[in-house]
Every structure is written in C-alpha cells, then in structure tokens.
Image (cartoon, rainbow, N blue to C red):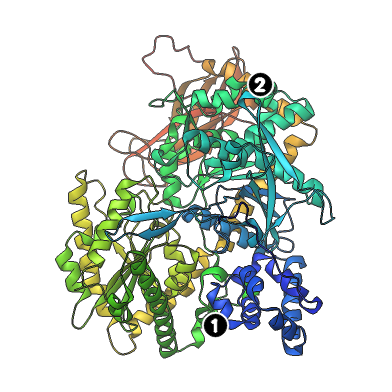
Amino acid sequence: MRAIRRFSVRPVLPEPLTGLGTLVNNLRWAWHPETQDVFEAVDPQLWRSTGGDPVRLLGEVPAARLDELAGDPAFLRRLELAVSDLNGYVSDARWFQSEAGSPVSGVAYFSPEFGITHVLPQYSGGLGILAGDHLKAASDLGVPLIGVGLLYRHGYFAQSLNREGWQQERYPLVDPDGLPISLLRDGSETNAAPATISLTLPDERELRAQIWVAQVGRVPLLMLDSDIEENEPAEREVTDRLYGGTTEHRLLQELLLGVGGVRAVREFCRITGHAAPEVFHTNEGHAGFLGVERIRELAADKGLDFDTALEVNRGGTVFTTHTPVPAGIDRFPVELIQQHFSADAFGEGVPIDRILQLGAEDFEGGDPGVFNMAIMGLRLAQRANGVSKLHGLVSRGMFAGLWPSFDSTDVPISSITNGVHAPTWVAREISQLTLAATDRSESEDIFDGLDKTTDAQIWETKRILRQRFIDDTRSRVRQSWINRGASEAELGWVDEILDPDVLTMGFARRVPSYKRLTLMLRDPARLKAMLLHPQRPIQIVIAGKSHPHDEGGKKLIQEMVRFADDPEVRHRIVFVPDYDIALAQPMYPGCDVWLNNPLRPYEACGTSGMKAALNGALNLSIRDGWWDEWYDDEFGWAIPSAEGIEDTDRRDDLEAHALYDLIEKQVAPRFYDGEVPGRWIEMLRHTIKELGPKVLATRMVRDYVEQLYVPAALSSRALNATYDGARELAAWKKKVRAAWSAIRVDHVELQGLGDVPQLGTTVGVRAFAALGDLEPADICVEVLHGRVDANDEITDPVRATLSLAETYEGNRHRYEGELKLDRTGPFGYTVRVVPNHKALASPAELGLAAGPSDPDDPSAPDLPA
C-alpha cells in the first residue's frame, strides 16, 4: 500500500555525540577530509554504502554502535577536535577581516542552482557548481555572503540509458528532512512557526514559500520551497524541479527566486540579526527580478520615485552573465510579464511600462514581443561581468546593441575568470604531495610542496588515483548495463575494462551541440586505432547529460554509447551515465588528460579542465574560455581551431584530425616515454604550480570583492545614505538625456604633427565642442587614438581626457590635450564627448556619446576666432 506522506526520522544522539550533529549540519564536511574521517569512523562500511552521506549514516547506524562510540575516549577526543576546528573556522578572522579590512558589510548572491555536494542535489551543471564553489571560497576567505536559491523537490533529473543507448530521465523525490539543512523558524523554540514569504499572483492567487537554510561553512544558503500546505496544488509545484515545466512555470520560478529571494533575505536578517546585504549579486539572469523587488521596496517603504529607486538598486547590484549565445538567455512573452506585474499583483509604485522597459529588446534586431532576462540584468546592475577574458569580449559584442553610440570595446561589461574550489576537487593524495592544507586554501602558495616530491612518487600517486577511478567506473558501468536490461551472466567483461597503466583521457560536461561530444568520432577507424595501439594505447571515459527537451543532444549521447558498446573497443572507451559531483570527484584525479573541444567561442569559461589540472591532468583543448586566456604549452596542448570556416562539417573534420594528430604524435608518445616519463611529469609539476594558483576559486572571489563588491558597496552607500545622492543622480541623468541631442564636436585639429609623423612624437589636440543646455562639469571630452584597420576603425584604442581651455559665447568650449605617437604603422584618432558624473561606473553607462560633426554638413556652426 502506498504511503500518503513520507518523512525522515532523525536519530537522537547520545549526549557525548551531539558534536556529530554539529558537524553534519555544516556542509564544510563536504570539502574537509578530516571531518569525513570522523564520519567514516562511526561505521566504515555504512559510510561507503550511504555514498558518504552523513545524514543517512546517522539515520542508519545501529543504536548499539552509537552507545559504543559514546563510551570510546579515542573517538570522543577525535570528535571534540573536529568540532573545535569547525568552530574556529567559522569564527576566526580570515582574509576578508584581516587583509581586505572588511570593506563590505554583506553580499546576497542569487543563483537558480547551487552545487555544494552530491548529497544536496540542487544543481544541473557548470552554473550550479560554480555557484557552490563561489560560496565555499567566500567562506574560506571570510567574505560575508548570503546565498539565495530554490529548493527543488525533485532536483535535476537522474540519468540512465535504455538498451538502445537512449537517455532516460527520472526525478527522485528529495526529502528535505533527509538533507543536512534546517527550516528557518520565526523564533528560537523548536515548535516556532516556519518563516514564510509570499507573492501575489494574477487572479488573486498567492504563492507562499518556506525557507530552508544550508550552512556552507560560514555562509548561509537560503532555499525557498513552495511545496507547503498553505499553497494551492499549482503553486506547490513551482519548486518541483530544476529547469523544467512550461514557460509560465519557469517565470514563476524566477519570480520566486528574485522577488521571493529578496523577501527571504529580509526575513533571515530580521530573525537571525545577520547584517543586511548592501550588495546584491545576480548570477545569470534567472534571478533578475530581485532588482524589481528592491525598487518596489524603496517605493513602498521609503516613498522613492521609480527613477531614484532604480539608481539606488543599480549602485549596489552586480550582474554576471555566463551565456555566450543569445539562445541561452531566458526570454518571456511580454503579455506574461504584464499579467504577473500588474498593479494588483505588484503594487502601484512600479509601473508596468517601466518594468517592461527593463527587459525590452529595443535595439536593432531585437524582438519587441519578448522580455529578455539578461537585458534586464544589465539594466538593473551598474556593474556587470563575463566569466573569462574571451567571454567578456564575446559578451561586449553580444550586448553592444544596448550601447549603440559606443564601440564594443567600450561596452561596460568586464570579466572575472571563474575558478574552482581546490579543497572540494583535489584528491587527498594530491593535496598531500603539494602540502595543500585545507586551512591554507585561501593562499596561493599551497602547491610549493610539490618541489619536495620525486618523479616516482608523483607517478605512483597518479597510478593509485587511476586505479581508484577505474574501480568506480567499473561499478557504475556494471550498474548501467543492468539498468539497460543485461544480466549478471553477460557482464564478466566489465571487470576487465580500462587499465591503470594506460593513458586515460576524460571528457565530461553537459551535452549541447556546441560542446561537440562526438567530435572524436569523426573518423571512427582512426579513433579505434588509437584505442587499440599495441604500444601506446589510450582509453577514454565519457560522461554527460543532455537537457530532457534536447533531442539533438540525446542523439549525440546515443551515438557515443553505441560506439562504446562495440565489443572490440568497450574495454578502452566507456560512457558513464548520471554525471554528478560524486562521479566527478574521482574522475578528475584519475585522468591524465582532460579533453575539451567546444565550438569556439561558445565556451563561456569551462571549469572542468581547471579541476583536472589541479589534480595533475594535462589539458587537451580548443583555445576557448579560460584555456584561451591561460594556455601554456607546459600545461597541455591546444587543438587548432578552424574558426571562420562556415561549413560546419568541414570545420569539424579539420579540428577532429588536428585532435587525432596531437594524440598520436605528441600526447601518447610523451606519456609512454619511459617507465617514469620525466618530461610528462615535468609538465604535470608546471601545471599544478603555475596554473594552480590562477584557477583557484579563492582568487576568483577576491577578484569579485576588490573589483566589483567593494565599488558596488561604495556606490550603494553614497546613494543610500539619505537618498539625496540617488535623487540627484536620477535628475542629472534625466537632464543629460533631454539635452544630449544638442551636443556636438564642431572641430578637431592637431598641432605639431609635422609632414612626416614619427614614433615618439607628442602632438597637441584641440577640440571645439558645443554643449547645448549642459555645463562643462556634465561632460568629459576624450581623444581616442591607436592603430586603424582597412576601414579606418581604431583597434584597441587608447583614451586620454582633454582639459577645458577656453569658453566662448553660445556655450561653446575649447578643450586641449596631448597624445603620443607610440606605435608605428597606420594611426588614427577621434574625439568624443561623453557624460561625466562621479556616481557613474563607466562613461558608457548612459549609452550616450557625441563625435565630430560631418565637415561637409552645411549646418555645422562657425568656429570661434
């Protein structure tokens, strides 16, 4: 008989073992091996069978064993030390408090998914893993972050294969009572009512949510859950699964994340006394409605008009885009937005026409019928960034329509390259070789110990990790084949797949078409020859999920699985289903080479190769994302890109054969060069020591603090103190926009150029500008100069500000300055006028610029004498 309700019953721990509950309830155990050792000591076999889940462990361990441990002085001492270490970790001053000087009171970090541990399945792929690493690194550094997300009752899907190799999806129920999280209650009593937030929906419906808290080291992660009895059935389903449902269902999720997330932060701070955040960080556009909610708050609670509230919000908001293609952005029908942001549902202070303007594609080539979440994110944040240098460049081009008066180089989107959380991803054996102690994880010298190890030690360590990964893979492949309908009698061959002495390559990621899972299959015969080479064989382990609605991605998986099913090669190439954190953690250390062959430039960053590199794997990748930025031939190999060839089949053929050549002629010969291949290990050492510090998530979070959070906090304080700053800024922007059509540069001249310009010459620049109704303090006059291309476009321009030299009647002015001819070849310059205000984060913020008048324009005014 089916139960009408299910719940998890947690054990009552003997008083001496209450420290186990303390350790379980802080997810630091997910990246702290010493805490994991304590759990393993409770019951080693049960720890393994529960997959390293401490909640399940304590729920299943016999009471007699708990009583035994309660009387074991050695275990109690070990437990006491672990609890003491955790208490010190969460309370002692760290980088943020000491070196950084605590420059920000708090940051709220919003993301639709968070990958903290496989025990908390609230992630699908790279975005969630990055968000989880961001929280962990912020905790290690002492940055006062609050994470905000949703609690999906079915998480993302679990993947399996059918007999034909087609992806199957199932959605296991996630029971919050069985997770290392706690319900936020409005009071300290155990029977206090759960804290809830609510949103008004169309047709007088109400969407309510309770708030679960996962403690990620020092960082609380708030997760909103709509599956509560107070909701109607449709509203209970809003947080059913990640990235599922209809368009309206997705909109409701994003409303709950953004609007509900701000309200959850307010409740959490009220109940716990946590400092209210002064910076709000939107990790991708899904949470963009948080800015609309903050404007509503300011209008309702402070009486601010929309424009003033917008400036207050913008000053303290950071937006990170992870999407390199427009197709990856959430876009909703305008009519749907109108329904959900009516005055009845959202209040009078935020007019629907102003909300629609925030997400409008009102630029050349835009669709007036859709509301674009990334566009809204950019308009609601004064500071925005991509996630690698190349992605920043791509993003500036992709969103250039929002700043039509500026070249893409001036678009105000910076870049902070992603990083990965070393204590989560680096195998303990590698950490021991490098002396990467967890409590030093915020430092960049954690790899220096590698100098004290011998080549033989490193080589043997990698073999041990390879064997462990192979054992795990064999177990997973066996279970996969059983799920596909095979019997145990058919599966004797699984015990022989893979070899710990063979060059092992890994390929694991989501499976959209641009990541090209099947590029390695362009010439199946050549791939087989490499897999079966008599002296220098390779073996490849592949994993990845395709979105449930992506039929093309599923076909790619099926093509790969069918190739790997071939009895001739199945001992050398395998596809392992259900790629998640638990699969990834042994995979990165167990691989010698990490393969990545996206279609450049569609990889925003890609962090899997970073995790592999920290574990002593060399990268074999197209120069895209982070690999384009930090490539070094001592870190691995760059697959030549045939970018620019429009025939996709031709391009894939060229890049696949370049990949084959690299493996056959460089990668495999170097790996098999001797019993202990010195040149290979030299590259491995160089990768860990030189690349390692760059790819750390602590480096990334420090960059966010210094480059974005601190400037945003300063802007927020300046605009928030009395709101006079925000009012003045909003009024100034209105004035500048109204007057800008009259701004013009009438004439520009150079002085001292000579007949033959020579390198190193300094020339004077004079520009005459008419300012209409604006004052000189409202604008800045700049000269841009540098090399020019065949179309006279200035490439990589250098900017210099001109100074006001003289004023004439009619509000005309002469500006002067100098520029140095610092490069040879074709050289060009121009002058422009841009708005100028101390509260602007970029000259391009308003999207306004005025250049020189057309010299043949008969309406051009006469110049002053």
**Helix, strand or loop status at disc 1:** helix
Give the image location of residue 462, x and y in percent.
41, 82
Give the image location of residue 814, x and y in percent.
55, 24
Local crowd at mark 1 within 10 Å, few (<14), some, or many (≥20)? few
Q: CA distance from mark 1 to mark 2?
A: 60 Å
- Residue 625 horizontal side relative to residue 275, left or right: left
Local crowd at mark 2 within 10 Å, few (<14), some, or many (≥20)? some
Residue 200 higher or lower than 157, as above or below? above
CB-based contact (under 8 Å), mark 1 and mark 2 = no
Which amino acid type corresponds to the residue marked 2 in the rendered image? Ala
Quarter-wise, where is residue 492 in the image?
bottom left
Residue 69 higher or lower than 850, as above or below? below
Which amino acid type corresponds to the residue marked 1 in the rendered image? Gln
Quarter-wise, where is residue 796 in the image?
top left
Residue with the mark numbered 1: 432
The answer to whether residue 470 is seen in the rendering is: yes
* Residue at 51% across, 48% down: 242
Residue with the mark numbered 2: 343
Quarter-wise, where is residue 320 in the image?
top right
* Residue at 65% across, 70% down: 59
Residue most extreme to the front? 1
Give the image location of residue 138, x and y in percent.
64, 59
The N terminus lies in which quarter of the figure?
bottom right
- Residue 829 horizontal side relative to residue 93, left or right: left
Residue most extreme to the left? 525
Give the image location of residue 851, x and y in percent.
46, 25
**Helix, strand or loop status at disc 2:** helix
How many labels were placed on the picture?
A: 2
